Image (tube, rainbow, N blue to C red):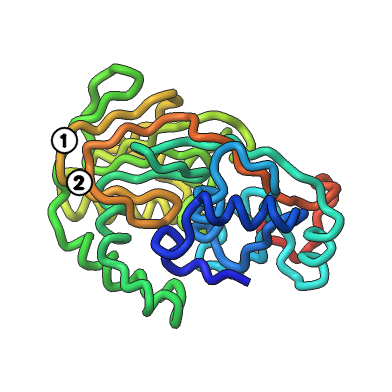
Amino acid sequence: MLRLWGLDQHLSQEALERIVKFDRFDALIAAGGDGTVRALAKALGPNASVPIGVIPVGTGNVLARELRLPSRPHDVAEMLLNGQVSEIPGAIAGREPFFLMAGVGFDGEIIAGLNLELKRRIGKSAYVWPTLMALAQRPKQLSVLIDGVHHKASWIVGAKAQRYAGGFTIAHGISVGEGRLVAVLFKATTRRGRMLEMISLGLGQHQRLRSVRTLPCQRIEVRDQGFPVQIDGDEDGFSPVTIGIGGGNLRMIVPADTSEQPTDSFTE
């Protein structure tokens, strides 16, 4: 049993690899959310052969929703014991691997202001105050290169999955199981414009706004300094940052027959 709070500080990649290889574990099972899975995948390294299974008890559980993982305890146990292993292509932001999304700007500000201890105690409600604080700030414009083409935006999300922040849909026609990346550019210049983008995102209508643009891509470069970055819902410092496909695959245990999911699963 290993506690993953502060995994990077307490357990090196080499130490975890030695534990896994020495004891010849069949799998590593994580009770947590998207950040927990990412931290464990990072500690294992990009070439790990041991698969990861997740008991989805995180805040957003975006990965569980994307993979249509079950939520009932009996079905979760059945999946972990008898499921199949699926390869999830990774992406990378700077030197950090991720599997769902990387954001620069607005959502990075929210994550930077999040009280993690409060989040563990009250869940999603902990996001209310940092979200209000971020909305109170006038959007700052930044320069971004999308596959070498210059764009302006005030918030950028590099999406590798369809869902975002729980059950919201940020990009259509993309799957976490594919090695594809979509850049979602939010270009609001006022607080009112940012609020409209937020409401539209919640309703799944953000792509109808003139201030929002979605571009399939391979590489996102933010060269401006000082913009907060988040990856898979975790704080990741500040820009400049380069986001792209790569960084190794995540080997995940999923239900044996993904075409017949239980009715009580992480779906919309």
Q: What quarter of the picture does the N terminus occupy?
A: bottom right
| Residue at point 48%, 61% (across, down) | 11
Q: Considering the numbered disc 2 on the image, is that residue within a helix, a strand or a loop?
A: loop
Task: Give the side of residue 125 with respect to residue 39, left or right.
Answer: left
Mark 1 highlights which residue?
224
Type of amino acid under label 1 = Asp
Left-right relation of 37 to 225: right
Q: Residue at x 54, y 67 (%)?
A: 58
Residue 26 image point, x, y percent: 77, 54
Q: Quadrant of residue 182?
A: top left
Q: Position of residue 39 (x, y in %)?
A: 49, 55
Element under label 1? loop
Q: Residue 136 location in percent, x, y?
A: 16, 62
Disc 2: CA contacts within 10 A as few (<14), some (14-19) or many (>=20): many
Q: Is residue 104 left or right of residue 244?
A: left
Task: Check whether the beta carbons of the residues at disc 2 and disc 1 lie within 8 A of each other.
Answer: yes
